[in-house]
Image (cartoon, rainbow, N blue to C red):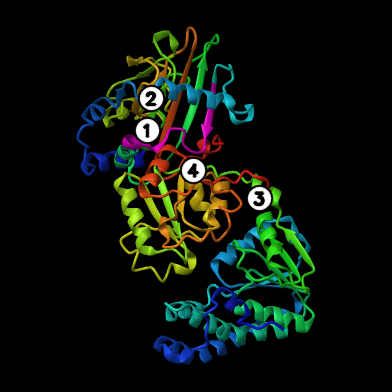
Amino acid sequence: MMKFFLDSLYSLLFRKKITGWEEFYRNGYIVKKKFLSEQECDHLISQFRDQEESMLWKDKVGSDSRWYRNGFLLTPEQSREHDLFARQYIGRKIVGFDMMGNVSFKEGNLGSGGGWHRDSVNRRQLKFMVYLSDVDVENGAFEYVAGSHKLLSKVTTNFFRRSSRYNTSFQGDLLTGKKGTLILFDSSGLHRGTPLSRGERWAITRYYFNKTIPANVRVLLK
Amino acid sequence: MLDEFYYHRTFFPDYKQRNISSHILCKITFLILPLVHFFNRRQVKRIKLSSADVLVFVFTENQRVAYRKFLESSQSKIYENLLVINFDFKFYNLLAEIALIGRNFRKRKFSRFKFELELNSYLNAFAGNYVIHFNDHSPQNIFIYNKCSSKNVKSVFVQHAGVNNRFPPLYNSINYLFDTLSEKIYRDNGIRDEVRQIEILTPKERNKKKALPLGKIPGSVVIAYGKYDSVDLVRNVYRELRLHGFNVYIKAHPALRLRHFFKLFNYRTVNYIDNSLIFAKFEALVVADSYVMVEAYDLGCKVYVYPGLTERYRDNYLFVKYGYIKNLLKSERDLVNALNTYKSNFRNDEVLFR
């Protein structure tokens, strides 16, 4: 907890806010349409399908399968703007990787991420997600509580508890979009992938960490 | 017996012996050397050389890494009761490095002189079967070989860096090479009668090695350069890539790190001893002519061969000749485009490296 408070205080006092990203600082997320073209999305999905079974991670129900790649799938040209922002937002020394996932409808599925959660409370972390297929309300759209990345929100939800997973439900913004839509968000805010009632969802996610990747995540990289 | 300067002449045909004491810093080091030698003699007496079966000489930090890798391989299990003598941390090694900034021939001659006294005392006291060393073209290694052959001790050579067709023939009795390409080049160069055994250092294991799961630094590029590359051109490329938003670092060859300290003072550099730590974390490697690209490829780092780092591109390691490099990048613009779209021009999938 101490580390979390110190880091938040440091960012409040010393870190400069970058102009043009005001919406991100206010809500904790930002949405951009037509980030990738349809052809690029299809090419990425075909790359996933070429992978062997051993390269993939699957959940217990079998609805969520992921490919944690030790490297990047999106080219530097595509992600340049966000890389530079991440370097400012998290700190100069960042490492990262790309994860590509497919969530499909199975009975009793909780959606991507397994319900409401924060990825970390005491660690600066940033993610961006690109939908590789059209995503609507029934299809596992991403949901984010606006402003929950701020210090006050973290204090109210997590002051007396250690866990960053929640059984209670929150009122979040449903972020639907077409193929190639990008969502950049601070993953220390409250978020989830809504449970699917039909179809499947393809998405690619980039993780940014400060200096090192935690050991439990590093084990998954292939 | 082999002549110490035989190998030097193959690299530098115009070589002439000159008066070494012309350099002022050299004079100073020559004055200090007897004192250092006196302390080293005391050290030799303390180490029980007679009880060891295998003696290992390590001269630089590169060779230290090679020694560690050699221990991991299955071939090293034959050798037991090893005694390592590490010159890397010795004071006069650093002193000589500082004193001999500049000319190559002076360094060669001086390195022969500074090691000869100490090597002689070690090898005289040694009563084992094998001597392992990691280089084959410097005077001290030839001195080791000559001494071993006179004592009927087998000298073992472990390859620590890439070779080209201008390298001299193999001469040690047992040789461990690290890939089939090196073996092919050595066989083309000719092998001397003294050679008894040539093996490749566990090639299967080397190719199985996966990238370390550390994640990568986004937009990161490391520019590696060596002796034949120009520092000014490297700095130009560094600035150009920074302007295009890449996270650029420079990696100098270990032998040049001290020499170019002030030239790279305002530039971001990486100074890890083990290359694998660098290539596991970086996305891309920009290089003109170096064997480092093989290692980088194995660790999931994309390789971009750009001859614009040198004034004259030589294809030293014959990668163009054997077809590993497809299209050389012609300009900085090509380089930036290739980096942006992940179009690497080095491939290592073919049979030669397996």
Of residues B201 and B306, the one drawn nearer to the viewer in this rendering: B306
Marks 3 and 2 on same chain: no
Residue drawn at (61%, 79%) of the image? B140
Percent x, y for residue A13?
21, 42
Quick one: label 3, few (<14), some, or many (20+) residues within 10 Å?
Answer: some
Q: Looking at the picture, which amino acid does disc 4 mark?
A: Ser
Of residues B177 and A111, the one drawn nearer to the viewer in this rendering: B177
Residue drawn at (35%, 63%) of the image? B232
> In whole angstroms, how far apart are the C-alphas of marks 3 and 1?
33 Å
> In whole angstroms, how far apart are the C-alphas of marks 3 and 4?
18 Å
Q: Dot 1 corresponds to which residue? A: A78
| Secondary element at tag 4 | loop
Magenta-drawn segment? A65-82
Q: Dot 4 corresponds to which residue? A: B344
Q: Dot 3 corresponds to which residue? A: B353
Q: Dot 2 corresponds to which residue? A: A36
Percent x, y for residue A61?
58, 16
Q: Looking at the picture, which amino acid does disc 3 mark?
A: Phe
Quick one: label 4, few (<14), some, or many (20+) residues within 10 Å?
Answer: many
| Secondary element at tag 1 | helix
> In whole angstroms, how far apart are the C-alphas of marks 1 and 2?
8 Å
Asked whether the beta carbons under mark 1 and mark 2 sit within 8 Å of each other, the answer is: yes
Upstream in sequence: badge 3 or badge 4: 4
Q: Looking at the picture, which amino acid does disc 1 mark?
A: Gln
The chain letter for the residue carrying disc 3 is: B
Residue drawn at (57%, 59%) of the image? B317
> In whole angstroms, how far apart are the C-alphas of marks 3 and 2?
37 Å
Q: In which quarter of the image is residue B190?
A: bottom right
The chain letter for the residue carrying disc 1 is: A
Q: How many numbered marks have been drawn onto this rendered protein structure?
A: 4
Q: Nearer the viewer, mark 4 or mark 2?
A: 4
